[in-house]
Image (cartoon, grey):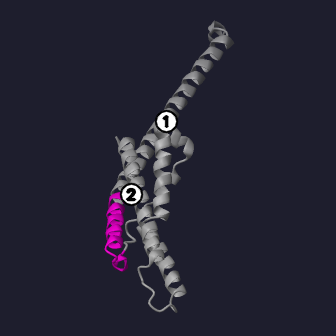
Amino acid sequence: MGILLSQEPFSFQKTLLIALIGALIGQTLILLVSWIKQKIDLSRKKQMIVNDLNNQNKTLDLLSEKHLELQELFKQREAYQFTSSVFHTLQLDIYQSVPKNELHLIFNKKLADLVDVYKSIEFIQSNGPFWIYKDYLEKSELHLEEKKNEPGHNFYCDTHLGFIEIAMKNIENNMSTIKDVKSKIKILTE
């Protein structure tokens, strides 16, 4: 009986203070771990996008070569020799897989350039050399069909030369866009 009487009374305030300090330490650790995980995740996603931009840059080089090849074939009136590779295509998958709010956290002030790069890539993807050539072929075939009953119709008539001129302007526009995109990629990957 003597042992029970000699113990101190239970201090509710001391216990409450210890619990509060423990909860604060626990929450601080949870927030710190969460912050570190987010930083690691954003760093990983940034590296993924930078790698993608470097790959896009290489593909843009190949597309530039194809544009120049097509342009030269148009100049020589030998566009029928043009071939295009399906293996060198631009992709938007990685860019689209990262939520926009995370892109903002990763790239801050460079976000506008990043969005412009991928919008331009999307444009080039849908208006590249293959599509320029396809559009040219469709227009020239339609024109030839319309003129098939006209004897002495010159293949390279003004209309056909107009189709070539349009294709050449589209190539020049794409080359200008590619040059702009490549300069922005350089800034984003530094």
**Image x and y of residue 98, in percent:** 51, 49
Residue 10 visible in image: no
Q: Where, quadrant-wise, is the N terminus in this rendering?
A: top right
Q: Nearer the viewer, residue 71 or 12?
A: 71
CA gap between label 1 and label 2 equals 28 Å
**Image x and y of residue 156, in percent:** 41, 79
Q: Which residue is mark 2?
A: 175
Q: Secondary structure at mark 2?
A: helix
Q: Where, quadrant-wise, is the C terminus in this rendering?
A: top left
Q: Which residue is mark 1?
A: 108
**Residue range highlighted in magenta:** 60-83
Residue 15 visible in image: yes
**Image x and y of residue 185, in percent:** 38, 47
Q: Residue at x 66, y 8 (%)?
A: 5
Q: Residue at x 33, y 73 (%)?
A: 73
34 shown above or below 47: above
107 shown above or below 152: above
Looking at the rendering, which quadrant does residue 188 occupy?
top left
Magenta: main secondary structure equals helix
